């Protein structure tokens, strides 16, 4: 028997209904913030992710699904959403007339080859959004606001935004040099990956899961101590805006995020002060890195599966419709014909409707009524149908009425 691949899962039943509910809430919220939906290809040229995410990142070095297609092109399955959206932005030359910011959101499958664990899979869904064209701190605040309110609307009240600033190019360069000087005497005590990172991108050392507990990590230089005046004022202004918007946040000077393209603000959404649900930040310069002009950008991505797990663990009930509106029962062939066209009419008028397509007996059909938890049932009867009548029964009150067939839609509209 062929089974699903490790780190993947099937979506159906109650899980599918829960995800549809979450999708609707997130899409509606994005609409209020005037973000339009985008979906990019599931695979892209490998160069896109190597150049944007960074050659020194764990994602590129260890986690991407890379392969050659039949044309000998280097292809990578999408590991994150931002790079593909930036490629779309460039390919469609949307930078040419930026009279207004370009704001989009996505809800797509991503692929990373990592050890599967609870809330983390090799195939996973990432919900996120990007804003291009504005370098104003207000756009940073808007993105954080959208992320923060998404979790609050889903029912996770105890969320905090952890924030830090990497500063502009000058500030980041100064901080990089400080990290190099600090870690060089301790190089032998670092893991093998960090020994590589110190030469390629020392900021990545702070994100190490192996050495994160060491005192040398805890005592490392802080980004905010190396911000120039302009970057410092920008970070202070962001905090003022978050205060005005009543967004709960906390300063985390060790937060650098795992991707190389971030600068200025970086942030994570954390539940109960410990459980990271998603993160993002500003990436001025990323459009240039991929061959475009200088266009500022800021964005966020949610760990969708981790969020669903958090909802369950925190007792947030996601409403699931486990019933149908109408079940049509029949015995004879002529009654079956009526059930066939009447089922379609009811569905096209907005009612969730079922009828038997397995050739069950009337007794078996009644069992289906209970399994589907039908609100109303209609037992079609040839004698009644001759007079254009049907018997409809409320499955909860057990009351039944004889009505004209032509009045069925109006009857259901009044009683549902």
Image (cartoon, rainbow, N blue to C red):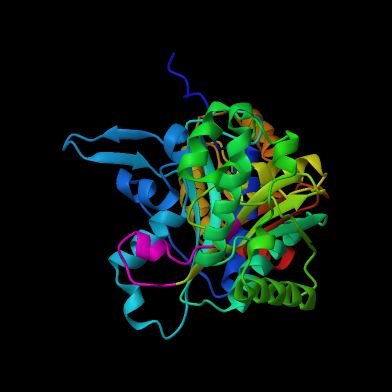
Boundaries of the magenta span: 280-295
Residue 87 covered by magenta stretch: no
Disc tally is 0
Residue 356 in percent (x, y) is at 54, 37
Q: Is residue 136 left or right of residue 375?
A: left
Between residues 146 and 264, which one lies in front from this camera angle? 264
Looking at this rendering, what residue extends furthest in the left direction? 71
Residue 404 appears in the figure: no
- The picture quadrant where one finds residue 266 is bottom right
Q: Name the residue rendered at 66%, 66% in the picture.
A: 144
Between residues 201 and 19, which one lies in front from this camera angle? 201
Q: Is residue 328 left or right of residue 340?
A: right
Residue 386 in percent (x, y) is at 53, 54
Q: Name the residue rendered at 68%, 69% in the picture.
A: 145
Residue 69 appears in the figure: yes
Between residues 349 and 117, which one lies in front from this camera angle? 117
Up/down of 118 relative to 303, above or below = above
Residue 263 in percent (x, y) is at 54, 62
Residue 285 covered by magenta stretch: yes
Up/down of 208 relative to 49, above or below = above
- The picture quadrant where one finds residue 43 is top left
Q: Name the residue rendered at 69%, 57% in the picture.
A: 402
Q: Is residue 194 left or right of residue 64?
A: right
Residue 119 in percent (x, y) is at 65, 36
Q: Quadrant of the C terminus?
A: bottom right
Looking at this rendering, what residue extends furthest in the top direction? 1
């Amino acid at each position: 028997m062929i089974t699903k691949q490790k780190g993947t899962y099937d979506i159906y039943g109650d899980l599918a209904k829960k995800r549809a509910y979450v999708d609707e809430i997130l899409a509606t919220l994005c609409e209020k913030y005037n973000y339009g939906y985008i979906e990019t290809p599931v695979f892209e040229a490998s160069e896109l992710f190597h150049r944007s995410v960074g050659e020194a990142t764990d994602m590129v070095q260890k986690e991407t699904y890379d392969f050659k297609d039949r044309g000998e092109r280097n292809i990578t399955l999408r590991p994150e959403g931002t790079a593909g959206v930036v490629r779309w932005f460039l390919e469609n030359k949307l930078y040419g007339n930026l009279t207004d910011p370009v704001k989009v959101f996505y809800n797509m499958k991503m692929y990373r080859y990592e050890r599967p664990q609870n809330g983390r899979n090799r195939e996973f869904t990432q919900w996120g959004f990007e804003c291009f064209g504005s370098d104003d701190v207000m756009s940073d605040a808007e993105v954080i606001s959208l992320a923060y309110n998404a979790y609050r609307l889903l029912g996770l009240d105890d969320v905090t935004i952890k924030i830090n600033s990497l500063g502009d190019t000058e500030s980041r360069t100064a901080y990089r040099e400080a990290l190099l000087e600090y870690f060089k005497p301790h190089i032998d005590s670092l893991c093998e990956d960090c020994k590589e990172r110190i030469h390629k991108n020392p900021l990545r050392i702070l994100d190490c899961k192996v050495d994160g507990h060491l005192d040398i990590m805890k005592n490392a230089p802080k980004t905010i101590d190396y911000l120039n005046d302009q970057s410092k004022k920008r970070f202070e202004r962001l905090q003022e805006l978050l205060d005005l918007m009543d967004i709960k946040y906390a300063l985390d000077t060790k937060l650098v995020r795992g991707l190389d393209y971030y600068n200025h603000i970086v942030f994570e959404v954390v539940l109960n002060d410990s459980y990271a649900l998603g993160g993002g930040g500003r990436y001025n310069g990323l459009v240039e890195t991929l061959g475009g002009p200088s266009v500022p950008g800021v964005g966020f991505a949610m760990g969708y599966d981790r969020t669903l797990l958090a909802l369950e663990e925190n007792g947030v009930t996601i409403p699931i419709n486990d019933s149908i509106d109408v079940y049509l029962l029949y015995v004879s062939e002529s009654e079956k014909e009526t059930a066939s066209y009447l089922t379609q009419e009811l569905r096209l008028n907005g009612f969730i409707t079922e009828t038997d397509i397995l050739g069950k007996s009337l007794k078996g059909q009644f069992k289906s009524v209970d399994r589907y938890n039908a609100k109303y049932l209609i037992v079609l009867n040839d004698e009644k149908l001759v007079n254009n009548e049907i018997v409809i029964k409320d499955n909860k009150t057990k009351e039944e009425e004889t009505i004209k067939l032509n009045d069925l839609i109006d009857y259901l509209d009044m009683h549902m």
